[in-house]
Amino acid sequence: MKRTLWMTMFAILALAVWLMAQPSGDPLIEGFRTVEVASVSDAMEQLYGQRNYMSHDMRPLATTKFAGPAVTVLLKKEEHKEGSKASEGMLDAIDNAKPGSVYVMVVEDGADYAGIGALMATAMKYRGMAGAVVDGSVRDTPQIHRLQFPVFSRGVAPSTTINHYRVAGVNVPVTCAGARVSAGDMVVADEDGVAVVPRAKAEEVLKKAQALDDTEHSMLPFIEKFKSIKEAVAKFGRI
């Protein structure tokens, strides 16, 4: 009983610290934190004819929603005996990350390797990062759940990348679960998945996504009242 109470109090404290660490005042980031990823994806397609969302198996460990500029890390598969020395770059990326940023890690052929675990997630949280997206697996999920730090991955595995991978680049362009991501691009995540918006297109995409959100949210009560989705689409022009 005491242990359960202590764990609950720790989780509440950790969440409070993380929320206080999130920067505010950037209208672009704040805007993307409120729109739906589905609308961001639609906006990218309607404005630019581009698909820049991650594959369906990029899923969150827990219900979450976040947005922020990307910090990218690329791991290449290579057997060696250098231990964590070969991974210093991915740790530097965390220690040098600005509050509110999103850690985007690509683990080459990494479905059976955990790119991050509790130690890295703890460091990200207390650096004030918004979340992590891993094209690979994660581990230490009970501890990450207690941290209440948002993590997306393509799977869960007990393995390590140490001695099996080497950092090939930090803040370099990567393809993460099918989506192209460069450092500073806007990463937007919720229960529907993860979308990526190039920084240069972010303002226009946000404006379009907000308009799509507004339209859809207006359609819902219309459908409830008139019990016809066909009439709603004819009136509002969206499905």
Image: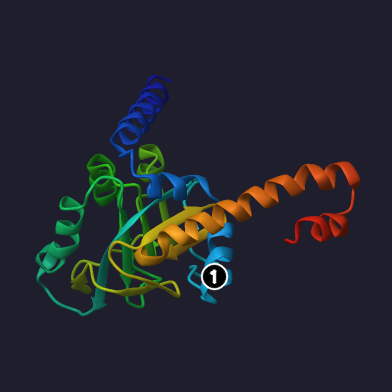
- Give the residue at x 35% y 50%: 140
Q: Quadrant of residue 39?
A: bottom right
Q: Quadrant of residue 208?
A: bottom right
- Give the residue at x 32% y 56%: 69
Q: Which residue lies furthest to the top in this view?
A: 2
Question: Number of labelled discs?
Answer: 1
Q: Residue furthest bottom?
A: 78
Looking at the image, residue 212 sits to the left or right of residue 97; the answer is: right
Determine whether the residue tagged by mark 1 lies in a helix, strand or loop.
Answer: helix
Task: State the colouring used for the structure image.
Answer: rainbow
Q: Tell me if residue 24 comes above or below residue 180 in the rendering.
A: above
Residue named by callout 1? 47
Q: Residue 166: image x %, image y %?
A: 18, 73
Q: Which amino acid does label 1 sit on?
A: Leu
- Give the residue at x 30% y 39%: 23
Looking at the image, residue 74 sits to the left or right of residue 216; the answer is: left
Residue 155 seen in this snapshot: no
The residue closer to the viewer here, 45 or 18, is: 45
Image quarter (top left, top right, bottom left or bottom right) of the N terminus: top left
The residue closer to the viewer here, 38 or 165, is: 38
Q: Residue 233: image x %, image y %?
A: 80, 59
Label 1: few (<14), some (14–19) or many (≥20) C-alpha neighbours in 10 Å: few
Q: Residue 207: image x %, image y %?
A: 51, 55
Residue 23 seen in this snapshot: yes
- Give the residue at x 83% y 48%: 223
